[in-house]
């Protein structure tokens, strides 16, 4: 009898890539942001991040054990979720907040739907929405000053400016200036220009302002994003269309005195303030919960941008990144369905 | 030189280092061969010999089973000892004719028509059909059919495929280096048959010496040119090659190159055409790369059709390590075959050996919708949704996302981080939809 060999379908070669390698590289890409938040907020930021990660990993393992399926925590996806959950709270939060957030993210956000690949929503964002709804004072309010600077990056504020300008996060101030009637339009415009001035923007870029752990430094996040882009883990379509849409809409609608009254720096301010960089590069690009078609990714990014701006300018919250992505997550199957491209060589009818 | 290419595709290490420096070597006359009756696309050929018949090398042993079919010829002289089912390089058992050689290699009479270019076009086509020439790049479409476009269709360009984008394989590369003249002669014959003024030879940039050599040879020839192509898989796929060299898009849903006034042939086929027209020499031998890192002495062999893979491997010194997988063809679209006791056919461009580690397939995970397959698909299809639709038997969606357009190049499965066996699912989808269509026609 001749020796026989096992057969399998082609192709017989495979690129050195796996779900595991993708997830761990995302985790690595998030590290610069962790380091910067430790610099600005102290070791508590790191501690809370660790709590988030450990809780996510344990929850995933326990549920998989209950479901009697292979435990896959080594694939790193729970680690990434845990990190992102912690990134969404501020460094003064109690230790149990990231723990509960991570349990929710993995349990309700992911495993209930069948685990990795089946979840319709970004688990970390779902957890953020859950935390904001359950403990509003712990998550959105109560911002901490960074060790080196102010909460909102404003300095040398004239004494006659009301407290509303001095107490909130940068986006909170921007919102208040649009909404309030307590401030004269003269002061409002001055304050807005100061807010969207190069000094504040530089602080936002490097991270020397108040905010949640993960969104503090645009520079650190961009470094991580550049790494992921270099490794072809994230593409340009979602971040560029998302951020581009925000910039354009803010330029058109963001000013206090009606259409096109915004300074050219206001869109820049809006890009670096809040969670847009974190959201556009790390959350909206979540593979499981974003479209697979190339056109779909662009529509998805534009949709996120529109909703973000609507919330920031006319909604009830100063920040709209997380809800915009969650809302667009729901539309992903629909977007995929309507953006199936014409095959190569399709004859026009 | 600016390199042309197509949209999508994947980058892999080309693994050609094992065999690319080995000049073509003649594989000694085998004692026994098996000639499968079907080595091509179309109807299988029909045997015209009986058990016990004596045949000469080059003698026709089976006739074409229709217009889209080719005859087969004895590749050694000897006796017909069996007509039965044998292992076939596509991985199953198929009818074939076994010839036990007399060791003398007594040939039929060949001709040498020095003025072969003045033969009539019909005579040329007849000789090509009689010689059993089919595409030698893999698919094996009968060449005389390709060269007979229906009336009303004009062909302005003949493209020779010297891309050899499958990793590991170097058979076409060696042919271009060692037999460039014959390749060009074949090209001119094809251009004459289809009355095309232009001839293009497409070669991937990882074969710079072949590009240089052939460029030099066609410099003074009117209408001929070499196009250097970017190293990217599947650069040698027919539609991708046509797009890269001419900018024309072959229509999907079964469109043929002739729809955009082009005919594509492999460089090895070009030589077979030349030999058929000038010498009436039937296609009974070809170049095959025997390669892989466990092969002791990887070679490019000129071997008779029907030679056994086991003997080719033995001639290359066997393997240094245990064999994990035997692949007939290249690693991207080739067939894993269960036994080395398989005869090579006219389409056998390579015999690739993997060790146990290379043969190991990782576990399949859930799709994480990364869209990697969408990014690389050269046909602009949506493999991830396609495969899911097949999995859940949503045939309408499977068709909408292109399951019937897929050429199974394997780029999607190559990049899939979840190790999903996309091509297997797509194959299933194709056959199910064929079945459904058949049933619909009946009803």
Image (cartoon, rainbow, N blue to C red):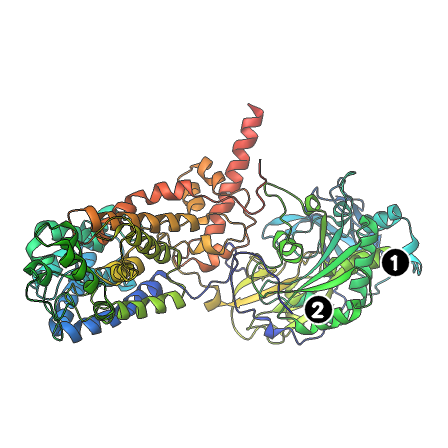
Visible residue check, residue A97 = yes
Picture disc at residue A174: none
Name the quadrant of the N terminus of chain B: bottom right
Name the quadrant of the C terminus of chain B: top right
**Residue A333, x across and y down, in percent:** 35, 43
Residue at 46% from the left image edge and 36% from the top image edge: B395
Task: Tell which circle, 2 or 1, labels the residue nearer the N-terminal end.
Answer: 1
Nearest to the observer: residue B76 or residue B410: B410
As displayed, is residue B150 above or below residue B330?
A: above
State which chain disc 2 sits on.
B
What's the CA distance linking mark 2 and mark 1?
23 Å
Picture disc at residue B301: 2
**Residue A60, x across and y down, in percent:** 21, 57
Nearest to the observer: residue A117 or residue B335: A117
Left of A144 or right of it: where is B40? Answer: right
Visible residue check, residue B78 = no
Residue A163 placement: quadrant = bottom left
Left of B200 or right of it: where is A63? Answer: left
As displayed, is residue B99 above or below residue A50?
A: above
Q: Please check whether the numbered discs 2 and 1 fall on a single chain.
A: yes
Q: Are marks 2 and 1 in contact (CB under 8 Å)?
A: no
Left of A232 or right of it: where is A177? Answer: left
How many numbered marks appear?
Answer: 2
The residue carrying pointer 1 sits among few (fewer than 14), some (14 to 19) or many (20 or more) residues within 10 Å by Cα, namely: many
Residue at 57% from the left image edge and 42% from the top image edge: A346
Residue B21 placement: quadrant = bottom right
Query: What kind of element bears circle 2?
Result: strand
- Which residue has dot 1 on it? B278
Left of A316 or right of it: where is B227? Answer: right
């Amino acid at each position: 009898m001749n020796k026989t060999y096992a057969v399998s379908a082609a192709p017989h070669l495979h690129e050195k890539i796996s779900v595991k390698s993708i997830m761990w590289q995302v985790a690595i890409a998030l590290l610069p942001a962790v380091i910067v938040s430790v610099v600005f907020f102290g070791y508590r930021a790191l501690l809370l991040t660790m709590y988030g990660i450990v809780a996510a990993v344990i929850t995933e393992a326990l549920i998989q054990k209950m479901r009697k399926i292979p435990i896959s925590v080594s694939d790193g996806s729970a680690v990434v979720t845990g990190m992102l959950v912690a990134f969404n709270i501020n460094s003064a939060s109690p230790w149990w907040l990231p723990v509960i957030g991570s349990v929710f993210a993995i349990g309700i956000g992911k495993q209930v739907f069948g685990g990795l690949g089946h979840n319709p929503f970004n688990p970390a964002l779902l957890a953020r929405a859950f935390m904001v709804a359950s403990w509003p004072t712990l998550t959105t309010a109560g911002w901490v000053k960074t060790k080196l600077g102010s909460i909102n990056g404003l300095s040398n504020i004239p004494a006659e400016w009301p407290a509303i300008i001095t107490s909130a996060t940068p986006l909170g101030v921007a919102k208040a200036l649009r909404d309030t009637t307590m401030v004269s339009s003269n002061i409002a415009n001055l304050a807005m220009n100061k807010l969207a001035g190069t000094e504040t923007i530089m602080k936002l870029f490097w991270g020397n302002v108040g905010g949640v752990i993960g969104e503090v430094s645009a520079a650190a996040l961009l470094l991580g994003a550049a790494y992921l882009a270099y490794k072809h883990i994230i593409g340009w379509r979602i971040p560029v269309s998302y951020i581009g849409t925000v910039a354009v809409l803010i330029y058109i609608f963001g000013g206090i005195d009606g259409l096109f009254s915004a300074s050219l720096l206001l869109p820049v301010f809006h890009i670096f303030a809040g969670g847009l960089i974190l959201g556009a590069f790390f959350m909206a690009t979540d593979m499981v919960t974003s479209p697979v078609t190339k056109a779909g990714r662009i529509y998805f990014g534009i949709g996120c941008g529109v909703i973000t701006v609507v919330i920031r300018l006319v909604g009830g919250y100063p920040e709209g990144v997380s809800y915009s992505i969650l809302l667009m997550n729901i539309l992903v199957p629909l977007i995929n369905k309507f953006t199936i491209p014409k095959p190569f060589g399709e004859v026009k009818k | 030189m600016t390199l042309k290419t197509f949209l999508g595709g994947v980058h892999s290490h080309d693994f050609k280092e094992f065999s690319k420096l080995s000049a073509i070597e003649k594989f000694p006359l085998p004692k026994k061969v098996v000639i499968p009756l079907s080595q091509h696309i179309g109807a299988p050929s029909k045997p015209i010999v009986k058990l016990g018949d004596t045949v000469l090398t080059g003698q026709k042993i089976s006739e074409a089973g229709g217009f889209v079919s080719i005859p087969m010829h004895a590749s050694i002289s000897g006796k017909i000892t069996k007509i039965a089912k044998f292992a076939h390089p596509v991985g199953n058992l198929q009818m074939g004719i076994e010839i036990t050689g007399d060791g003398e290699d007594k040939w039929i009479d060949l001709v040498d028509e020095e003025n072969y270019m003045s033969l009539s076009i019909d005579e040329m086509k007849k000789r090509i059909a009689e010689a059993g020439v089919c595409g030698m790049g893999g698919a094996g479409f009968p060449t005389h059919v390709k060269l007979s476009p229906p009336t009303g269709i004009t062909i302005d360009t003949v493209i020779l495929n010297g891309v050899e984008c499958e990793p590991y394989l170097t058979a076409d590369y060696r042919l271009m280096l060692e037999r460039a003249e014959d390749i060009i002669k074949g090209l001119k014959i094809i251009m004459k048959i289809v009355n095309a003024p232009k001839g293009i030879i497409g070669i991937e940039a990882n074969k710079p010496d072949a590009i240089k050599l052939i460029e030099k040879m066609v410099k003074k020839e009117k209408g001929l040119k070499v196009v250097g192509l970017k190293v990217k898989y599947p650069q040698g796929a027919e539609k991708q090659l046509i797009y890269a060299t001419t900018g024309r898009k072959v229509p999907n849903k079964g469109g043929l190159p002739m729809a955009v006034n082009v005919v594509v042939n492999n460089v090895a086929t070009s030589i077979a055409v030349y030999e058929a027209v000038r010498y009436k020499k039937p296609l009974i031998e070809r170049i095959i790369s025997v390669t892989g890192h466990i092969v002791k002495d990887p070679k490019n062999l000129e071997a008779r059709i029907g030679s056994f893979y086991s003997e080719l491997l033995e001639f290359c010194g066997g393997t240094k390590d245990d064999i994990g997988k035997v692949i007939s063809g290249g690693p991207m679209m080739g067939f894993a075959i269960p036994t080395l006791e398989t005869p090579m056919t006219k389409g056998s461009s390579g015999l690739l050996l993997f060790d146990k580690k290379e043969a190991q397939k990782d576990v399949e995970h859930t799709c994480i919708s990364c869209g990697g397959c969408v990014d690389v698909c050269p046909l602009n299809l949506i493999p991830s949704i396609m495969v899911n639709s097949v999995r859940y038997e949503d045939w309408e969606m499977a068709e909408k996302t292109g399951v019937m357009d897929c050429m199974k190049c394997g780029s999607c499965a190559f990049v899939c981080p979840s190790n999903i066996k996309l091509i297997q699912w797509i194959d299933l989808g194709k056959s199910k939809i064929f079945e459904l269509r058949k049933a619909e026609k009946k009803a």
